[in-house]
Image (tube, helix red, strand yellow):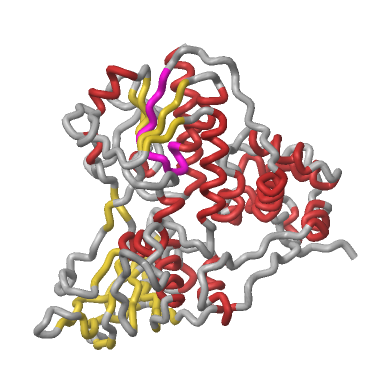
Amino acid sequence: MENMEKVKMKTQDPKERAQNFKEVELGYSKTEALKEANRCLHCKIPKCVEGCPVNIMIPEFIEQIKEGNIEKAYEIISESSSLAAICGRVCPQEKQCESKCVRGIKGESIAIGSLERYVADEAIKNGFSSLKKKRKNGKKVAIIGSGPSGLTCAGDLIKEGFDVTIYEVLHQAGGVLVYGIPEFRLPKDIVKKQVESLEQLGVKINLNVPIGNALTIDDLKKEYDAIYLGTGAGLPKFMGIEGESASGVFSANEVLTRINLMKAYKKDAKTPIKIGKKAYVIGGGNVAMDAVRSLKRLGVDAHIMYRRSEEELPARKAEVNHAKEEGIMFDLLTNPVKIIVDENNQVTGMEVVDMELGEPGEDGRRSVTEKAGSNHVVDCDMVVMALGTGPNHAALKNSKIELSDRGLIVVDGTKTSEKNIFAGGDAVTGAATVILAMEAGKKAAKEIIESLS
């Protein structure tokens, strides 16, 4: 009988992984990858490619896995993506390429992300490099921000002969890939190797440079033919409720940055994080899952509090399932209205209210209202807000770049209001996924090439 189910990727035992920061998913073996690749029907009209924001030629690279030619498979992927090992781990394939797979009509779709990860990991292990660049064209481009959007733009430009320099405010390159996504989902060594592959092509990366202060956009305009703004959206949002200024209330950004970038989970950490005994992470997205699972690994009794039901959780189902397996508690249809503090401004609990779901709105999400008379108190000594992020435009200091009412950079395609300055990713759209930021980086590279030709 034909196998209609995916080859499931092995994972660390939930009880063990809830106590360490090692990668949860262990990757495919050669045998497992071949078995999964053989499920692909190699459709004449591959809908999966249409579902991929960067249009990787999916059937073609899977066919090469079947043939045992992993280097060629990596070459095919690399024509569209410079960050295959990252995408294979963190992209929401179930909402993109895999959702279009015809295999999914009568069974489970092909595990495209798992196969991409397998190919990329084999490429790293064996030192494959299929990124080729053209002769220098004499044009110079500055990229502000080394997140997925900036790295993708840099990769596409360097291959076309541009001289590319990335400016990064932090002491490591990678943006949200290093400060936002935990080690157990995306090992930082993988990010480092992907960045190094771009450096080997000639991309220059200047760390610890806060554009807007150390250098301004006007300074860069004097030296570069074009500028790409891939500054992301790292400014945390809060609820505006009483008690949010208390000691013990954090943004998910701070928690994750301290843990991921500063290694606060290590005993000898120079920048430790003050953790509580019982914590509530407010929110239901991937960032909330990352934060709550990280706290669990630090020994905290960690809960998710989300105002809608499980069906409406925006986080990837795989991350929700992993969280449940690790013992994370979910307090659903509940929302905080006040953080309770003692005389020393320390968190001692939260006043919360039960919520009721209404009809779906224009965006398809169901409305939500408070249930009258349902207020009650929950005990905790730590609250983490994972409610999304907004753009931080420190880099735009003294520039004339137009912003929208929401504080996002206004673009036509990826062109800003200033000539030869382009922008994309979260700084333009608001917080989104890694792959959508990469899509913006590719689009910007194409427009920069057209503009400077």
Count the marks: how many?
0
Instruction: Check residue 26 for magenta coloring.
Output: no
Q: Using the rendered view, name the quadrant where residue 360 is placed.
A: bottom left
Question: Which residue is pictured at 84% across the width and 47% down the height?
Answer: 66
Q: Residue furthest right?
A: 1
The residue nearer to you, when weighing 386 against 369, is 386
Name the residue furthest left: 343
Magenta-highlighted residues: 140-150
Residue at image position (51%, 69%) is 21
Task: In the rendered view, tell whether residue 128 sits above or below residue 4.
Answer: above
Q: Where is residue 164 in the image (x, y as percent from the top left)?
A: 45, 26
6 to the left or right of 283: right
Q: Nearer the viewer, residue 355 or 112?
A: 112
Horizontal and vertical percent position of residue 435: 51, 45
Q: Nearer the viewer, residue 393 or 402?
A: 393
Say which quarter of the image contains residue 104. Answer: bottom right
Residue 146 sits inside the magenta stretch: yes
Residue 402 on image: x %, y %: 23, 31
Q: In the rendered image, which quarter contains the N terminus? A: bottom right
Q: In the image, what residue occupies the spot 50% across and 13% down?
A: 137
